[in-house]
């Protein structure tokens, strides 16, 4: 297949015309600021626009600038983030806001190097902030841009390969509109999100590139982009405990690093335990269970990992090691990750039943 990189330049003017007529109206695009672009782009990672919209509105109402974000407690931030998942994004936003408050007086820095030095900001987010707010000709290369570019130019290289991404970035940096780099990036994002759709389903009839797109002309829209097969997800069995002590239930804080770091969870251990082994695991947590009842199973899928969970409810007398005991009202203030969704619902039910006794 011959690659046609000149198509990127040919797309520039029709793309911007198309964008002016069809662009998505999104709250972070109206009166953009570096802070709004930054928060929206972080929220949009791995998350659909429709899911982000209510979170973004709530977040901006409570934390309208980097100084407010720097000052908020981690517990409150996690509560605002609850349900969006990938909590490392929230932790990085918080850390970066503290650097912005301490080092830059609360205003996001302007250069790509300074932006990229902030926690959680890589090439893509730095380029989005710099192009949309500072007029810098930096292409924001994400899955959308890679897909559109591979199809438009007929490139069959593996777009998950870092070297290929780098090459695409150089080509896109040449092609970006110098007068309207922010609009160009957002136009490419919109084209990828609404027209040049993934999984062989692009709406080429509506595309401003149709007259010269290589994949369309050569019938290769199903074959492009090429992506190396993903590694299969690792499965991990876990046993989760809902421990009742009077009208309170046990939660604990996860370790400072690793998966779901610092978040609140129900006590749990690795393995698909039977009652006898569950009692031993509880003894290691410093609690003796007077009765153990199975309370169902649940599954949660992370990017590279799948948790297969089973649960037990137990009544206990001891306070245990490292456990925090919360009542029904306090449970509602905690940001418990959606991985535990099934058990959070059970916990709520148990505590509400206790209140009704
Ligand atoms: S013509 Fe079709 S394949 Fe080519 S860029 Fe447009 S939507 Fe994508």
Image (cartoon, rainbow, N blue to C red):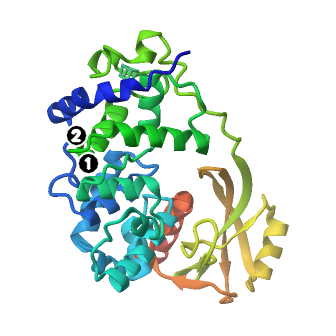
Residue drawn at the location 53% of the way across and 41% of the way down: 165
Asked whether the residues under the numbered discs 1 and 2 touch, taking CB atoms below 8 Å apart as contact, a structural biologist would say no
Q: Where is residue 233 in the image (x, y as percent from the top left)?
A: 69, 45
Q: Which of marks 1 and 2 is nearer the N terminus?
A: 2
Q: Is residue 218 among the parts visible in the rendering?
A: yes
Q: What element carries label 2?
A: loop
The residue drawn where x is 73% and y is 84% is 287
Front position in the image: 149 or 346? 149
Q: Which residue is drawn at 38% across and 52% down?
A: 44
Q: Mark 1 points at which residue?
A: 182
Label 1 sits on a secondary structure element that is helix
Q: How crowded is mark 2: few (under 14 residues within 10 Å), some or many (20 or more)?
A: some
Q: Is 56 on the left-hand or right-hand side of 306?
A: left
Instruction: Say left or right for 211 vs 89.
Output: left
The residue tagged 2 is 24
Please name the residue shown 45% across and 44% down the image.
142
Pick whichever, 263 or 251, lies toward us: 263
């Amino acid at each position: 297949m011959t690659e046609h990189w000149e198509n990127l330049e040919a797309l520039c003017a029709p793309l911007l015309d198309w964008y002016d007529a069809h662009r998505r109206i999104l709250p972070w695009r109206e009166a953009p600021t570096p802070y709004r672009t930054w928060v929206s782009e972080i929220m949009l990672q791995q998350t659909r626009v429709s899911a982000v919209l209510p979170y973004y509105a709530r977040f901006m109402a409570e934390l309208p600038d980097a100084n407010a974000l720097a000052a908020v407690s981690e517990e409150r931030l996690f509560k605002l983030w609850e349900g969006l998942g990938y909590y490392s994004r929230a932790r990085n936003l918080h850390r970066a806001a503290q650097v912005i408050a301490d080092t830059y007086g609360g205003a996001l820095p302007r250069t790509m190097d300074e932006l990229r030095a902030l926690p959680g900001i890589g090439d893509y987010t730095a380029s989005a902030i710099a192009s949309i707010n500072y007029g810098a000709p930096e292409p924001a290369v994400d899955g959308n841009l890679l897909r559109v570019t591979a199809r438009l130019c007929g490139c069959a290289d593996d777009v998950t390969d870092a070297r290929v991404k780098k090459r695409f970035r150089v080509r896109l940096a040449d092609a970006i509109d110098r007068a309207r780099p922010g609009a160009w990036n957002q136009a490419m994002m919109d084209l990828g999100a609404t027209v040049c759709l993934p999984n062989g389903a692009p709406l080429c009839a509506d595309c401003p590139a149709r007259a010269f797109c290589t994949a369309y002309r050569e019938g290769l829209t199903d074959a492009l982009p090429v992506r190396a097969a993903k590694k299969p997800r690792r499965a991990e069995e876990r046993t989760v405990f809902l421990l009742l002590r009077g009208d309170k239930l046990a939660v604990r804080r996860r370790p400072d690093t690793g998966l779901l770091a610092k978040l609140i969870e129900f006590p749990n251990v690795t393995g698909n335990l039977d009652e006898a082994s569950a009692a031993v695991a509880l003894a290691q947590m410093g609690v003796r269970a007077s009765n153990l009842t199975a309370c169902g199973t649940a599954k949660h899928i992370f990017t590279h990992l799948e948790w297969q969970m089973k649960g037990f409810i137990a009544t206990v007398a001891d306070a245990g090691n490292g456990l925090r005991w919360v009542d029904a009202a306090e449970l509602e203030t905690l940001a418990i990750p959606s991985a535990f969704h099934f058990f959070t619902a059970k916990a709520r039910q148990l505590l509400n039943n206790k209140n009704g006794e």
